[in-house]
Image (cartoon, rainbow, N blue to C red):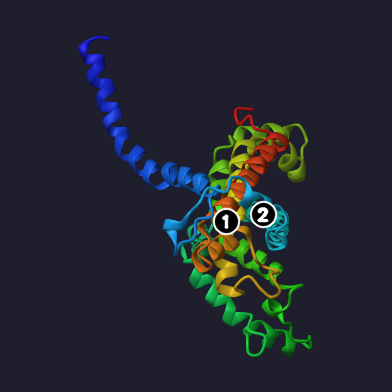
């Protein structure tokens, strides 16, 4: 390697160094510490008494009914949020892409919930959904329908959080879909029109296939974000009622920072991280991972 190549490589690595330091401090080192603590009985208030207990945390975890409930809740959330949020985002993108007037207004209107803090959004919807004096129940009673418990009901609370989450997040995926739609050559639609395809056939045979790379990106990021659900149940329901909105990430938070059981919380983190990796891989396998098609 000549001197100029060595200098170029050194310069490149120096530019990478700040990012590698940040990744090391906030990702790799915490991940390794979490893995280590998952094999210990580390309690935050008595760190000097920490002992290595091998797989005991994981054995306890397998029989933990609360963890199983939280996993069931997050699967319910994922199953509903994926088609609702992604479908809504695609529909909004199609509307904005077709609009000739006020396009910028619609982009801002649909995207504005995304830039709002999740805490603010959650508090806002708490007022709207208040069983006693909330705006939504006032509207229901005005049109002759009974008031609903919403977040106070174990049967309704998770579906309310699904709706709020989809409303808040769809605008972000809309912009990505919109970018994908605008990259589809107009000549392709003109050729399909000449061949006799109607709008629905164009959507099925032109739009969706050419949006495959964009769709795969959106599905993967939405899936990962869905598995990280914590803010909405933390603010709106505190995991209740009857643990019906408790999610694994919220359970990890409570175990680690409220109960101060760092060892068990680390085991929860390792187990749940493995579940997310497995389902992300499965999603890419079934949806199709080749974005170059």
What crowding class fits label 2: few (fewer than 14 Cα within 10 Å), some (14-19), or many (20 or more)?
A: some
Sequence-first disc among 1 and 2: 2
Q: Which mark is residue 264?
A: 1
**In this figure, which residue is indicated by the disc labeled 2?**
61
Return the x and y of residue 10 as percentages of the image width and height: 26, 24
Dots 1, 2 in contact, CB < 8 A: yes
Q: Is residue 35 left or right of residue 151?
A: left
| Residue nearest the observer in this picture, 4 or 239 | 239
Q: Which mark is residue 245?
A: none
Please state if 139 lies on the left or on the right of 111 as rendered.
right
Q: Quadrant of the N terminus?
A: top left
Tell me if residue 155 comes above or below residue 108 in the rendering. below
Residue located 53% across and 58% down the image: 101
Residue placed at 66% from the left, 82% from the top?
A: 136
| 271 is higher (above) or lower (below) than 11 | below
The residue carrying pointer 1 sits among few (fewer than 14), some (14 to 19) or many (20 or more) residues within 10 Å by Cα, namely: many
Q: Nearer the viewer, residue 60 or 186?
A: 60
Q: Nearer the viewer, residue 31 or 9?
A: 31
Cα separation, mark 1 vs mark 2, equals 8 Å
Residue 87 in sight from this viewpoint: no
Q: How far across and down, in percent of the image, does residue 130 sit?
A: 63, 84
Total label count?
Answer: 2
Secondary element type, mark 1? helix
> Residue 134, located in which quarter of the rendered image?
bottom right
């Amino acid at each position: 390697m000549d001197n100029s190549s060595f200098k170029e490589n050194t310069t490149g690595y120096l530019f990478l160094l700040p990012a590698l330091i940040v990744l090391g401090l906030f990702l790799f080192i915490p991940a390794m510490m979490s893995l280590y603590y998952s094999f210990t009985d580390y309690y935050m208030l008595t760190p000097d008494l920490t002992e290595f207990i091998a797989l005991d945390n994981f054995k306890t975890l397998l029989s933990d009914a609360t963890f199983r409930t939280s996993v069931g809740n997050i699967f319910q959330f994922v199953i509903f949020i994926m088609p609702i949020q992604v479908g809504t985002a695609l529909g909004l993108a199609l509307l904005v892409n077709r609009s000739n007037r006020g396009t910028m207004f619609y982009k801002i209107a649909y995207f504005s919930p995304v830039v709002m803090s999740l805490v603010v959004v959650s508090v806002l919807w708490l007022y709207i959904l208040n069983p006693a004096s909330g705006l939504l129940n006032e509207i229901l009673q005005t049109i002759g329908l009974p008031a609903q418990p919403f977040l106070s009901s174990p049967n309704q609370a998770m579906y309310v959080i699904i709706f709020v989450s989809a409303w808040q997040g769809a605008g972000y995926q809309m912009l990505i879909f919109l970018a994908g739609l605008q990259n589809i050559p107009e000549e392709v639609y003109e050729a399909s029109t000449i061949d006799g395809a109607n709008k629905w056939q164009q959507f099925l045979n032109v739009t969706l296939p050419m949006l495959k790379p964009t769709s795969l990106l959106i599905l993967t990021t939405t899936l990962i974000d869905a598995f990280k659900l914590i803010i909405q149940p933390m603010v709106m329901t505190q995991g209740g009622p009857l643990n019906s909105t408790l999610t694994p990430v919220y359970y990890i938070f409570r175990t680690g920072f409220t109960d101060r059981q760092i060892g068990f919380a680390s085991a929860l983190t390792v187990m749940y991280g493995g579940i997310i990796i497995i389902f992300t891989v499965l999603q890419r396998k079934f949806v199709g991972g080749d974005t170059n098609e």
